[in-house]
Image (cartoon, rainbow, N blue to C red):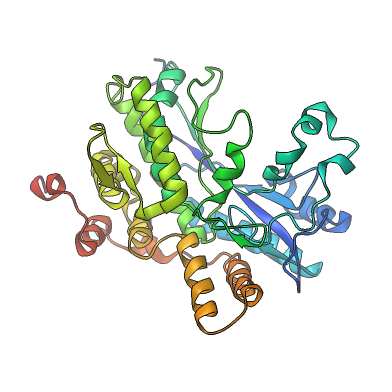
Amino acid sequence: MNQSAGDFDYAFTIREGFFVCEDRSYKLVRELPPRFVEDVRAQLGTRATIEKRGACIEVTSQRFLLAPEPVMDMPFLRDSLASIAESHGLRLLVAGTHPLGTSTESPASERRDSGERLADLRIVEQAQQTCGLRVQVSIPSGIDRVALMNRSIPWLPLFLALSTSSPFWNGSLGGLLSCRQARFDQWPYGGTSDFLARNTTALELNISDACTRVEDSVAIANLFRCHVSALVRNFQAGADHTPRTYAIAGENRSRAKRDGMDAQFISDDPASTVSVRRLLARFLDSLETEIARFGCGPILTTLVDIANAGTSAHEQLRIYERSRSAGHSHHAALESVLQWLTLKVPGRQIGKTSRSAGALFDAMTKAGFVTAEAVGHR
């Protein structure tokens, strides 16, 4: 190892996906207007990635070294992109899937440049119309990247549970909290990874749905950074994983996409389960060294908020059910969901950085899901 893991900065970047919608109908645009694309490139440059087809656009943060830096940068990116969209009579929407789904998309057979691969997969090509949260964390040189990535796999369902934001698909309730993951499962290479390549200088999290609330994105990114650092610091953690470990991870991913924070995960003992909230408490406790080192405890209190109130998917379903209970039609209830999703796009100052260093533990205690181990050694 050329650089001490203890001295390494574990710099990280965040990438968020957005849907571009018509202003009044909230439907996806068929393609991004050329002038809109020009303005995005002029103002955001290479920080914006524009899809060749469809109605999705991604923005990438700067390279962060300090935990609070995304608190300013991510709201700035959202505000900038939302302002550009508004100037063109468009709206942005942040969720893993657009609730109205693919109603405005062209069928794959109409796209002459799709190529043989997409022609063969025309039935599931629409799965591309999803948005996710990606977090890249740099890794010290000399680290066995394959081992590091494989050791992270059992924890990925937790990151999915914390981010679920896609309970609707193609104008209907999908029966899952992450329909985005179900879309990916239709691809031959979908699902939980078994083997990963060595040639990378960073570990990327890409299981998460796009987070409607910017503070959720920032908290999950900081959590993943702590996770990567902990894996490097303790290289024995997860070293004894077996094929059964990955099978359990695959099952827990299915449970996370269905039930999110309400899921019961299979533990190392297949005869028992653990709630996602309890697992989150254990996970945070195991990352105590990293949380203190990076000073991200105040930011991670958002995770306790998620555990208490749920993710974007939970809120979307609550809005939908309230509207239906009030006697509104399915379409009107969906419109209420769409309004909330678009109103939540603009970033705002995230005030949690002013909280004390012990705010995370205090919030966990108040929420009632601090582990016995955590109480015992504090």
Quarter of the view holding residue 36: bottom right
Quarter of the view holding residue 345: bottom right
Viewer-proximal residue among 267 and 228: 267
Q: In this rendering, would 118 be left or right of 12?
A: right
Residue shown at 62% from the left, 70% from the top: 334
> Where does residue 219 sit, x and y in percent of width and height?
42, 52
> Where does residue 243 sit, x and y in percent of width and height?
37, 20
Residue shown at 24% from the left, 58% from the top: 364
Asked whether residue 190 appears in the rendered view, the answer is yes
Toward the bottom, the furthest residue is: 326
> Where does residue 205 sit, x and y in percent of width and height?
50, 37
**Where does the N terminus fall, quadrant-wise?**
top left
Taking 247 as reference, is 359 above or below it?
A: below
Viewer-proximal residue among 2 and 101: 101
How many numbered marks, from 0 up?
0
Taking 102 as reference, is 294 above or below it?
A: above
Q: In this rendering, would 46 be left or right of 9?
A: right
Viewer-proximal residue among 167 and 230: 167
> Where does residue 111 sit, x and y in percent of width and height?
88, 41
Residue shown at 52% from the left, 66% from the top: 316
Viewer-proximal residue among 369 and 377: 369
Quarter of the view holding residue 246: top left
Taking 145 as reference, is 259 above or below it?
A: below
Asked whether residue 224 appears in the rendered view, the answer is no
Q: In this rendering, would 343 be left or right of 247?
A: right
Q: In this rendering, would 208 be left or right of 287?
A: right
